[in-house]
Amino acid sequence: MGRPGGADMTLGAWAELVASGLIAGGIYALVGLGLNLQYGLMRILNIAHGEFLMLGAYLTWMAHTVCGISPLLMVPVSFAVLMLLGLVVHRLCFARLAATSADVDVFEARGLMVAFGLMFLVQNFASWVWGGELRGYDYMTSPVAFGGAQFAGNKLLVFGLALLFALALMAVLRMTLLGKGVRALMQSPVGAQLVGIDTKRLHPLMFGVGLGLSGVAGCLLSMAYTITPAMGEPYTVTALIVITLGGFGSMGGALAGGLLLGVIEALGMHFTNPSLKALLSYAVFIGVLLVRPRGLFAK
Amino acid sequence: MSGTMNPRRDVVLLAVLAVVACAIPLVASDFLVSLALSCLMYVALSSSWSLFCGSTRYLSLATSAFFGIGAYTCALVLSSLPWIMSVALGALLAAVVALVMGAAVLHLRGTYFAVLTFGMTELIRHALTYFEKQFSGTVGRVLMEVPEPSTVYYTVLGIAVLTVLLAIVVRQSRFGLALSGIGADEQRAQTLGVNTRLVKLGGFALTAACAGAVGAAMAVRWTYIDPVTAFNPFIGFQTVLIALIGGAATLWGPVAAAVVFSVLAETLRLQLPQAYMMALGLLLILSVLYLPGGLASLRWGMVLGQSGARARERRE
């Protein structure tokens, strides 16, 4: 670790610091985007979002250590498996919830409680099946040099893929007819239904995509970090912070918010004290929610 | 709200239950007493949670914050203050924190409120951990002189009885009507002359005081206190689950659910901890999906059929 204070830091050290923030931020953005899709589109504040990330991580770890499958191959597989799981969960829980709730506020409160139940269920399922120990494997650990800075190869890969998925999702939302439908639903649920957008098909699909993205994030994380059944919860909180920073429902905001939070955390931890990290994130979160509840970038 | 309210019957029932609970330490084994203690703790926590959150439908996730503040206060002052004063101070401090927290977030409804109360709980926990590490040089505190187990038991019993009694009284009062008026339609309540801001603050502080007292009284059960055990988020979650599964809008639903779940928790947690937690999650999902009024609404629905459905409609 470098010494605190900026004057004696080389350009390379700065680059390493900001890059390590961006790498963490890439994952934050991906998790945030998934949650934002669920909350922005359907008003499901999926507090179990991080648990599905954890499932993606364990899936990849198992496939790699037991069957020897390349973690890279597991990226699309995690997406597909978690998306399927998302479709099932939506079908079993949220579809019924939407049908039986009187209005959006009631749906939101009940949805939050269902998500809490899912959190308990999934997290304890994982610790029952895989035990509570730290798990991990080595993958592309050799360092890569860029100018004066050095990065672990797997972390660079993780960042690249996280960014790729985030941008791909945004491109789909911006450029395809499907994406247009989703954006219309976010703007005005009633209006979108009036012009013939089918919520009964779009909602499960987008819930699945949200879980799929968190599965991808988990798969990527397992390449560079150790995993435990309890790893999901901090990411849920981070995702909440990210979408609060970026504004509920705003995809570009979530991407920018995720990267920004990663860099803020890296800089904050470097210049103050690593044990302040959690305190910093919660303070930012509560501050933004109280002062600018519609997000930092809201017009 | 819950149709027929009969305060006299409720008070009698409460008195009978209290007498039974009083007799437990005289006849039962140590294990049963500690089981009963954990039941009483969740009775107090979930009844006080329902008192405010059940009637106003403000979903507070800050119970573990109040519990932790009570526990920590007691750990700090126990050596210099008498036992009852320590517990009372824990309750008072928790209520003060609730007033500050409530002033900041009670104008927000629904998910914003839930998420913010959760965030603030975590903020308090992390701030305290940081403070202890940085300035006191310790992570936790050892409790040297703790009161007798029977003193703890009767204190928690007293808090639980007072909490349920408080819930009975509040339900009869104008204050209670104002709370449920806010739950039904906040704007209408305001238009009809209820000072919603004051009522919400008062209710939130009451809930916090009960949780703080429970935390303070339970703190001495662990001889060593650190922020992670005192502010354990699981205590808060389980309180909310118990209240919701039991039926947060009712008086006896949370009480019954607290007993059932504490017994389940204490017996299953040692052998099958994950199975218990998974069952808890599954039950929560099922009860939200199929029994929005909680288990307490089941009785009406089964016995009365039609009128049960109508009662549920009215509640919605």
Image (cartoon, coloured by chain):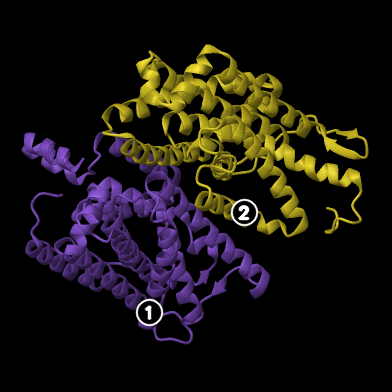
Chain colours: A yellow, B purple
Query: In this figure, which residue is indicated by the disc labeled 1?
Result: B148
> Residue A167 appears at what percent x and percent y?
66, 24
Along the viewing direction, whichever of A59 and A104 lies nearer the viewer: A104
Question: On screen, B254 above or below A44?
Answer: below
> Which chain is disc 1 placed on?
B
Question: On screen, A230 above or below A57?
Answer: below
Residue at disc 2, secondary structure: helix
For discs 1 and 2, the disc positioned in front in the rendered view: 2
The amino acid sitting under disc 2 is Ala
Q: Quadrant of residue A43?
A: top left
> Residue B84 appears at what percent x and percent y?
35, 81
Badge 2: few (under 14), some or many (20 or more) residues near its Cα, within 10 Å? many
Query: In this figure, which residue is indicated by the disc labeled 2?
Result: A278
Residue B31 appears in view: no
The amino acid sitting under disc 1 is Glu
Residue A140 in the figure: left or right of residue B298? right
Please report the residue visible at 78 percent of the width from the left and 32 percent of the height from the top: A156
Along the viewing direction, whichever of A237 and A297 lies nearer the viewer: A297
Badge 1: few (under 14), some or many (20 or more) residues near its Cα, within 10 Å? few
The label number, if any, that marks residue A179 in the structure image: none
Please report the residue visible at 19 percent of the width from the left and 67 percent of the height from the top: B165
Mark 1 and mark 2, same subunit?
A: no
Please report the residue visible at 29 percent of the width from the left and 47 percent of the height from the top: B244
Q: Quadrant of residue B192?
A: bottom left
Quarter holding the C terminus of chain B? top left
> Residue B10 appears at what percent x and percent y?
12, 62
Residue at disc 1, secondary structure: loop
Question: On screen, B283 above or below B31?
Answer: above
> Which chain is disc 2 placed on?
A
> What is the distance, in whole Å, between disc 1 and disc 2 at their CAs?
38 Å
